[in-house]
């Protein structure tokens, strides 16, 4: 028996394949420290797999990072998460999930809004998180792969994500 309700999410106006991914600057967290970094700084180094997820500690974030690790994606491409969680929470998630990735902290959900994937939480006035989404962006920030959840909870097909990474990394 499922102990949560599946919820249809409203339509999303997110970047599609061929669009330019919005640039942003937020604290980027790794296992040691964090600093403000622009997405364009990362894409200057090569393609980036952007993974938007709900706050750290929620089961969708745990499931996503376990799947990313199990598919070996961090060994193939820069993998960067984005959520409303604080840098402190991100450091805990990285340690607990043992994932070689970095995470952007976007507590005001401004990046989610720029990407058209904000998800206002029912019963929590003024609280918005990121709906699950995956964007593979190349060195010019052109979107090469895009997946956005249409319901909550919903997860991408990680084999499809891995195939897109293999094709564009």
Image (tube, rainbow, N blue to C red):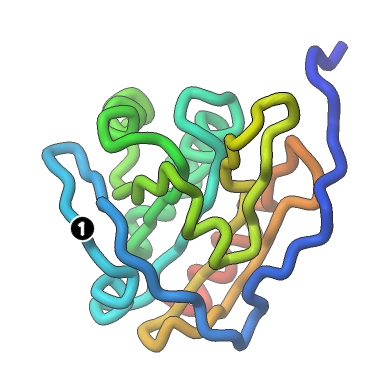
Establish if 132 lies above or below 41: above
Residue found at the far front of this picture: 125
Residue at image point 26% right, 52% down: 28
Residue at image point 30% right, 25% down: 92
The answer to whether 169 appears left or right of 149 in the picture is: left
Residue at image point 37% right, 68% down: 24
The answer to whether 154 appears left or right of 132 in the picture is: right
How far from the left and from the top, in percent, is residue 160?
Answer: 65, 61
Q: Nearer the viewer, residue 34 or 138?
A: 34
Residue found at the far left of this picture: 32
Establish if 93 lies above or below 8: above
Q: Nearer the viewer, residue 35 or 154?
A: 35
- Position of the C terminus, as image quadrant, is bottom left
How far from the left and from the top, in percent, is residue 77?
Answer: 36, 64
The answer to whether 162 appears left or right of 103 in the picture is: right
Residue at image point 54% right, 66% down: 114
Q: Quadrant of residue 38?
A: bottom left
- Position of the N terminus, as image quadrant, is top right
How far from the left and from the top, in percent, is residue 115?
Answer: 58, 66
**Which residue bears the numbered disc 1?**
36
How far from the left and from the top, in percent, is residue 132?
Answer: 63, 48
Report helix, strand or loop for mark 1: strand
Q: Residues within 10 Å of mark 1 (few under 14, many from 20)?
A: few
Q: Nearer the viewer, residue 30 or 34?
A: 34
Q: Quadrant of residue 107?
A: top left
Establish if 125 lies above or below 105: above
Callout count: 1
């Amino acid at each position: 028996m499922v102990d949560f309700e599946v919820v249809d999410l409203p339509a999303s106006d997110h970047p599609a394949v061929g669009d330019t991914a919005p640039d942003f600057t937020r604290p980027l967290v790794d296992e040691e420290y964090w600093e403000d970094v622009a997405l364009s700084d990362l894409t200057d180094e090569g393609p980036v797999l952007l993974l938007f997820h709900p706050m750290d500690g929620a089961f969708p974030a745990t499931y996503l990072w376990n799947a990313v690790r199990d598919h070996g994606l961090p060994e193939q491409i820069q993998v960067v998460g984005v959520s409303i969680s604080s840098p402190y929470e991100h450091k805990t998630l990285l340690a607990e999930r043992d994932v070689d990735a970095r995470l952007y902290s976007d507590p005001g959900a401004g990046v989610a809004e720029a990407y058209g994937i904000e998800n206002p939480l029912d019963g929590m006035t003024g609280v918005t998180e990121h709906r699950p989404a995956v964007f593979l962006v190349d060195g010019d920030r052109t979107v090469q792969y895009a997946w956005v959840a249409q319901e909550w909870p919903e997860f991408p097909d990680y084999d499809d994500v891995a195939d897109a990474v293999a094709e564009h990394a």
